[in-house]
Amino acid sequence: DGGITQSPKYLFRKEGQNVTLSCEQNLNHDAMYWYRQDPGQGLRLIYYSQIVNDFQKGDIAEGYSVSREKKESFPLTVTSAQKNPTAFYLCASSMAPRSYNEQFFGPGTRLTVL
Amino acid sequence: QQQVKQSPQSLIVQKGGISIINCAYENTAFDYFPWYQQFPGKGPALLIAIRPDVSEKKEGRFTISFNKSAKQFSLHIMDSQPGDSATYFCAARGTSGSRLTFGEGTQLTVNP
């Protein structure tokens, strides 16, 4: 089956710890994205990557870091510098960036800081 | 930050009724306007999308109406069903790349 997988589904973190969220896609998509979802605020873009070994900051990149070493993988690290990390994190991917291509979303990871 | 404003925040409709969700945008460079549907605990999925060269697009019970001069677009769900109960997001994409800007979301409840 083709699609986007995110792991883990639920993640608990103590304050001051870094944590990495996994995102893998087997759709052969060039572009990948990370969003944060909070109640009443929609989806806010954290980082995105349009090609391997390149990525750009979104609207709320502070306290987060990413890497894009492989086309199919785009892990997100939530660092201790992120002051309010509890949220639902969504990964997405799409074909060639400059077209009317649909963004496909993964099932999400719910991060809770204890 | 380019913004997309969505309303209402929540909506309750009786089965068989029409659900209407509205969005407004500021950036005239937006050239693609999708709507996403999200069920609890799941990722959003594309429902329907429109480009600004048409004023309306219909797919089954779902219709997008687009008013370029007013910089507004809306989603109409005809004959709403309990299975339509979900959160709906409008979005817009500019001509400079692939990133989407999302509205705040509308939680739709369709009562039986």
Image (spheres, coloured by chain):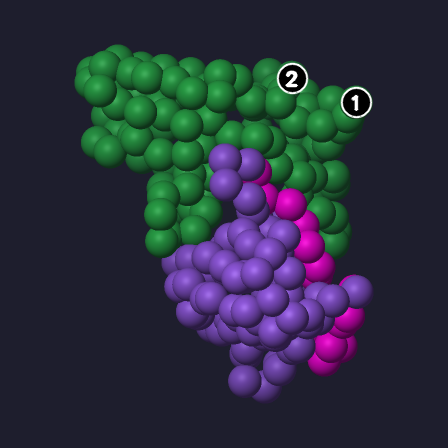
Q: Tell me, yes or no, if residue B91 can be seen here.
A: no
Q: Amino acid at mark 2?
A: Lys
Q: Residue at x 65, y 17 (%)?
A: A70
Image: B20 above or below A6: below
SS of the residue at dot 2? Answer: loop
Question: Front-most of A51 and A85?
Answer: A85
**B59 relative to A95, above or below:** below
- Residue at image coords 74%, 54%: A100
Question: Who is closer to the viewer here, A60 or B50?
Answer: B50
Q: Position of residue A30 (x, y in %)?
A: 70, 32
Q: Which residue is mark 1?
A: A1
Q: In green, which chain? A: A
Residue A2 percent location from the top left of the image:
77, 26
Task: Decide if residue A4 is in sight here.
Answer: yes
Categorize mark 2 by other alpha carbons within 10 Å: few (<14), some (14-19), many (20+). Answer: few
Tell me where the magenta segment starts and ends, as one range.
B43-59
The tint chain B carries is purple
Looking at marks 2 and 1 on the same chain, the residue that comes earlier in the sequence is marked by 1
Tell me the residue at 30%/21% (across/down): A79
Relative to B96, residue B79 above or below:
below
- Chain assignment, label 2: A
Mark on residue A70?
A: 2
